[in-house]
Amino acid sequence: MKRIDGRKYNELRPVELTTDFVKFAEGSVLIRCGDTMVLCCASIEDRTPPHVQPGCGWVTAEYSMLPRANRQRSRRDVDKLKLSGRSAEIQRLIGRSLRAAVDLEALGERTITVDCDVIQGDGGTRTASVTGGFIALALACRRLVEEGYLGRSPIRHFVSGVSAGIVGDTALLDLCYAEDSHAQVDLNCVMNELGEIIEIQGTGEGRSFSLREQQELVELCAKGNRELMARQREILGNILG
């Protein structure tokens, strides 16, 4: 099928990564995937939540969408006096994904919080948050090494996320909103540079899907994640070394 933006079925949207976008954050990046834009900022605190065992650190995330990130204005969560269910679910996904990238014992007794704020949403905001959030996290860890707080980076793996879906019975990589809104099946996949899966979220939006179709979508995501991690490595170099 012909895609709305002319891409091939297995082609990512154009990706732009602008690091040090925010002056005060220990690590920051503005990630743009097509028309989706997310600002990711990592902050370091010298304390951990009560549930974290002594000697270990913690990585967590927060996610929100600006009121005009979408085609119509949405209310801020603070106006509703609670975090929306969608935002809570997405930020838990981001937090789990980023913790999988870090040796928490090597991080030491400190917390890194990655704030992901969607400036403009056109599909794939949660996976863009994971991909950009990892860069912000890795930059913050690099600063801890450069300033002498750590002897080495606690980053264990590169991590990124991307979506795929079935639209008109065709499997497509990295859906934009126009495609996502008509998808029969939607799947988000977070992976590391070893090709291992950290998390899959797959939903039959318009119909159920087979194991073969699921595997086809995962393989598309694996291709997209390899390309995204190559872009991360261009910025971060061999941070694992």
Image (spheres, rainbow, N blue to C red):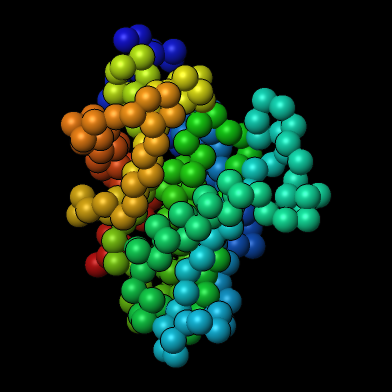
Looking at the image, the residue that sits furthest to the right is 79
Residue at x 52%, y 75% (from the top left corner): 111
Horizontal relation, residue 185 to residue 37: left or right: left
Residue 62 drawn at (x, y percent): 58, 57
Residue closest to the eye, 116 or 75: 75
Residue closest to the eye, 153 or 166: 166
> Above or below — where is 205 with respect to 195?
above
Residue closest to the eye, 106 or 204: 204
Residue at x 36%, y 14% (from the top left corner): 168
The quadrant of the rendering that contains the N terminus is top left
Residue closest to the eye, 156 or 74: 74
Residue 206 drawn at (x, y percent): 42, 24
Residue at x 50%, y 58% (from the top left corner): 92
The quadrant of the rendering that contains the C terminus is bottom left
Q: Is residue 2 visible?
A: yes
Looking at the image, the residue that sits furthest to the front is 208
Horizontal relation, residue 173 to residue 54: left or right: left
> Above or below — where is 138 with respect to 109?
above
Horizontal relation, residue 107 to residue 170: left or right: right
Horizontal relation, residue 95 to residue 25: left or right: left
Residue 211 drawn at (x, y percent): 21, 35
